[in-house]
Image (cartoon, coloured by chain):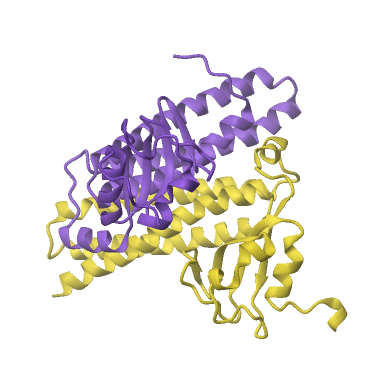
Chain colours: A purple, B yellow
Amino acid sequence: MEKEEMNVKDIFTEMKDISELVLDLAYSSVFFDNEEIAEEVKELEERMSELNYKIKAIAMLAARTKEDAENLSEILEVASASEEIANAAGDISNIIKRDFKIHPIILQALREAEEKIARVRIKKGSKLVGMKVKESELATAIGEYIISIKRGKKRIYNPDKETVLMEGDILIVRGTEEGEKLLRKICNGELNEWRN
Amino acid sequence: MSGEIDLRAIKDLLVIIKDISELMIDLAYTSLLYFNKEIAEEVFFLEERMDKLNYKLKLITLRAARSEEPEKLMAILEIADAVERVADASLKIAENVFRKEIHPVFVDAMKEADEIIIKETVNKNSKMIGKTVKELKIKTNTGMHIFLVKRGNEYIYRLDNLRFKENDIIFAEGPEDGKKEIEELVGKESVSDL
């Protein structure tokens, strides 16, 4: 495993970001029977347990007095609660990997009620390459909101307007069925005009 | 016939439970990062509500199993179990707010150190009534971002099309100097007016 320097603050911030994302993805994977999204959930769950391990290791090294230990236990409690959230999300998305099927009538109704989450890669030749999120107007023009970006091994949670999109980025987006179709074309370089 | 009614009820409950579980996670971290007891209390309140909803969901699912294939309903029980664990975990995170002081790590993790969270009630003379967030240009005018509205027992956080009503409780986050402007917006009577 690559050596990764993180302090407690970095770890906690990422745990919080994962917690806020993972459940959303888990529901979506089940409601839309999407294995790709379930795979994302699994990766996030694994990342979370890695982070929990890191935070425990740091805490053990840092605790010198009884007071230190008490202070650190508070952080560890929050960390383990965060891991529990990711695990529960993992169990939800596991539903589609096992042979559990949700009754079609329920599924149909849920799909109507929910926005769809999709996972799309930006390919070479796409207009999006080199564009800031703000400039891309994906939200205003086609109704697709970027909730996370996977760039190699790195993840960007809640990307801001200034984040520059790059070739190979995997976007996790929330939007409509129609918006997803357009976004796929944009990411493949088949659609170059979509902005208002 | 009754089977179909149960299936619709299951779907409605699932949508509510999904929304509440996501809201609980957000509020739990928010309460911790702002060390805010009011928000933590909302998490406690939601956890109780979640218990009841989950109980109801399981009950209806079992009842539906009389007329539907149980295999097609197993997944619902799995979701109910997982959501219960999410609610408990959120509660655990929020509970830390009732300690003596916040751990410096959580303070450090806050994006903007000078940001605050406020909770205000929309008064009957407020100019917000009948208007949407967009129409009021709240972010532009006050710098504050309203992220949650509580109307009676209902939590609303998809605010795009919401028109404010009297007695709505709003939760907003943003820079400290936005507080006064929000107070003015909700029609809060200042001490000098009394």
**Would residue A84 be found to the left or right of residue B98 on screen?**
left
Whether residue A190 is situated above or below residue A153 in the rendered picture = below
Q: Residue at x 65, y 46 (%)?
A: B33
Whether residue B186 is situated above or below residue A170 in the rendered picture = below
**Would residue B109 be found to the left or right of residue B2 on screen?**
right
Q: Residue at x 49, y 61 (%)?
A: B48
The quadrant the C terminus of chain B occupies is bottom right
Whether residue A40 is situated above or below residue B26 in the rendered picture = above
**Would residue A10 be found to the left or right of residue A40 on screen?**
right
Q: Which residue is drawn at 46% across and 64% down?
A: B158
Q: How far across and down, in percent of the image, does residue B2 sit?
A: 17, 74
Which corner quadrant of the image does residue B36 belong to?
bottom right
Q: How far across and down, in percent of the image, does residue A109 sit?
A: 24, 64
**Is residue A81 visible in this depiction of the protein?**
no
Q: How many marks?
A: 0
The quadrant the N terminus of chain B occupies is bottom left
Whether residue A54 is situated above or below residue A86 in the rendered picture = above
Q: Which residue lies furthest to the right in this view?
A: B192
**Would residue B98 be found to the left or right of residue A172 on screen?**
right
**Is residue B100 visible in this depiction of the protein?**
yes
Q: How far across and down, in percent of the image, does residue A42 sit?
A: 34, 34
Q: Which of A114 and B184 is in front in this view?
A: B184
Q: Nearer the viewer, residue B191 or B9?
A: B191
Q: How far across and down, in percent of the image, does residue B141 sit?
A: 67, 65
